[in-house]
Amino acid sequence: MQKNKTDNFLKAIKGYAKHQKNLLKSEVKQLKSERLKEAEEQASRERENLVRIKLIETRNRETANLATKMQEGQKKLFIERAAMTEEIFHAASEKLIAFTQTEDYSAKLSESAKKIAEFFGGNDCVLYVSERDIDAAEKMRSMFSGSVEVKADKTVKIGGIKGYCAAMGVIADETLDSKLEAQREWFVENADLSVL
C-alpha cells in the first residue's frame, strides 16, 4: 500500500509537472505570438514613418526643382521680353530719325520751340538740340523774348529741342528721345508681350 501511495504520489507529481509544462508551453507560445505581433506592428509603424519621410523628402526636392525651373523660365522670359522691347524701341527710334529728315519735322521743331518760349516767358535760356538741328535752332531764336544760347547736346540722339531756364530752375524737354522713352514704361505694362 505504501508503494501504491508512492506511485500515486509520483503520478500526481508527474501529472502536475506535465500540466505545468503544458501551461508554460502555452504561455511561452502566447508570449511569443504577442511579441511577434508587437514586433510586426512596430516594424509596420517604422516602415510607414520611413515611407512618409521619403515622400516628404521627395516632395520637398521636387518642389525645390520646380521652383528653380520656374525661376529660370521667368528669367529667360524676362530677358526675351526685354530683348523684344529693345528691338521695338530701336525700330521706333530709327523711324523717328527718318522723320527728322522731313518737312513735318521742321514744323514740329518750330512748334516745340514756340511752346518752350511761351513757358519761359521773357527769361533767358539755353536750348539744347542734336548736332543735326543746330542751324534750325539758331533760326528759332526770334521766338524767344529773352536771350538764347543754342548748344549741341550729345544726349539728344533722335531730335527735338530741350530748354533750360536758370531763373526758373526748370528744364522743358520737347525732345523726341524723351517722348519715346516716356512710352517705354507704358509699353512694358500694356504690351502683353508673349514669348513663344
Image: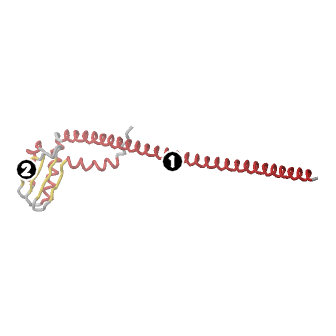
The image quadrant that residue 74 belongs to is: top left
Q: Which residue is mark 2?
A: 150
Instruction: Give the quarter of the figure containing the C terminus.
Output: top left
Q: Residue furthest top?
A: 196
Which residue is drawn at the image coordinates 74% and 51% (left, top)?
A: 27
Q: Residue furthest front?
A: 2
Which color scheme does this rendered protein use? secondary structure
Percent of width and height locating residue 89: 26, 42
Q: What element does badge 1 sit on?
A: helix
Left/right placement of residue 114 relative to residue 36 reads left
Closer-to-camera residue (152/18): 18
The image quadrant that residue 68 belongs to is: top left
Q: What element does badge 2 sit on?
A: strand
Left/right placement of residue 51 relative to residue 157 reads right
Under mark 1, the amino acid is Ile
Q: Which residue is mark 1?
A: 56
Which residue is drawn at the image coordinates 65% and 50% (left, top)?
A: 38
